[in-house]
Image: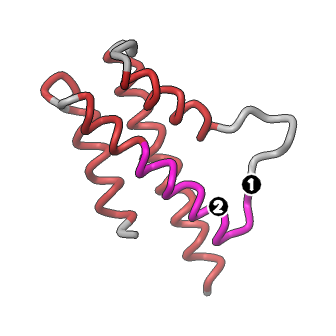
Amino acid sequence: MDYAALISELTETSENISQTDPAKIRQLLDRAVVAVRELRDKIDRHPALNVRDAVTFLEKISADLAVGDVPVDQCRSALKDASVMIEDLAAKSRSKIY
């Protein structure tokens, strides 16, 4: 997966959220969930059992978008959070390889 392209797309969409189709936002959040899980597996870093998983938040926003029940600010926040998570995990993944 091209994480840099996904990060860029998440960031760009968060900045232009009012002009973006909710279906595209949902697709991006779903791709972000896959990317986060993939990167976590690569570096063997998973959330603690007693901590709420941020991926659950992204999945909930995506599901709520399907029924049109998400405020614009919450969508923007989810997209930004996803890009930061992917960027952080990708950096850790690269440093673990070397």
Residue 44: x %, y % from top left: 74, 67
Q: Label 2 near label 1: C-beta < 8 Å? A: yes
76 in relation to 37, above or below: above
Of the pair 67 and 7, the residue shown nearer to us: 67
Identified at 53% across, 48% down, the residue is 85
65 in relation to 9, above or below: above
- Per the image, the residue denoted by label 1 is 46
How is the model colour-coded?
Answer: secondary structure
- Looking at the picture, which amino acid does disc 1 mark? His
Instruction: Specify the quadrant of the image occupied by residue 43.
Output: bottom right
* Residue 94 included in the magenta stretch of the image: no
Q: Secondary structure at mark 2?
A: helix
Report whether 37 appears left or right of 64.
Answer: right
Quarter of the picture containing the N terminus is bottom left
- Per the image, the residue denoted by label 2 is 40
Residue 14: x %, y % from top left: 28, 34
Identified at 43% across, 45% down, the residue is 30
Q: CA distance from mark 1 to mark 2?
A: 6 Å
Disc 2: CA contacts within 10 A as few (<14), some (14-19) or many (>=20)? some
Q: Which residues are magenta?
A: 30-45
